[in-house]
Amino acid sequence: MGFIRSSFSFIAGTVCGIYIAQNYNVPNIKKLAESTFSTAKQVEEKYRKPKPNSRDES
């Protein structure tokens, strides 16, 4: 009885998540995260400070 009581919220959340994923247009989180990371990387490279000159050039 304790196992069912302790895992009820997990099971209910899983069932609700499956229902929502099948019946509504839910965005693909993995693709969204990858595109956001790619954009952030491009912005970081564009505005990065230039590297200081090495001592060999002096």
Image (cartoon, rainbow, N blue to C red):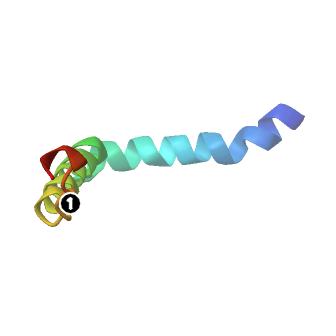
Q: Residue at x 73, y 39 (%)?
A: 7
Q: Quadrant of the N terminus?
A: top right
User: x%, y% of residue 47?
Assistant: 15, 67
Please identify the quarter of the rendering in which residue 18 is found: top left
Name the side, left or right, on which 52 lies relative to 9: left
User: x%, y% of residue 21?
Assistant: 33, 45
Name the side, left or right, on which 17 lies relative to 58: right
Q: Residue at x 18, y 49 (%)?
A: 38
* Relative depth, front residue between 33 and 37: 37
Q: Secondary structure at mark 1?
A: helix
Residue 1 visible within the image: no
Q: Residue at x 26, y 53 (%)?
A: 24
Q: Residue at x 64, y 43 (%)?
A: 10
Residue 37 visible within the image: yes
* Relative depth, front residue between 28 and 6: 28
Q: Which residue is mark 1?
A: 44
- Under mark 1, the amino acid is Glu
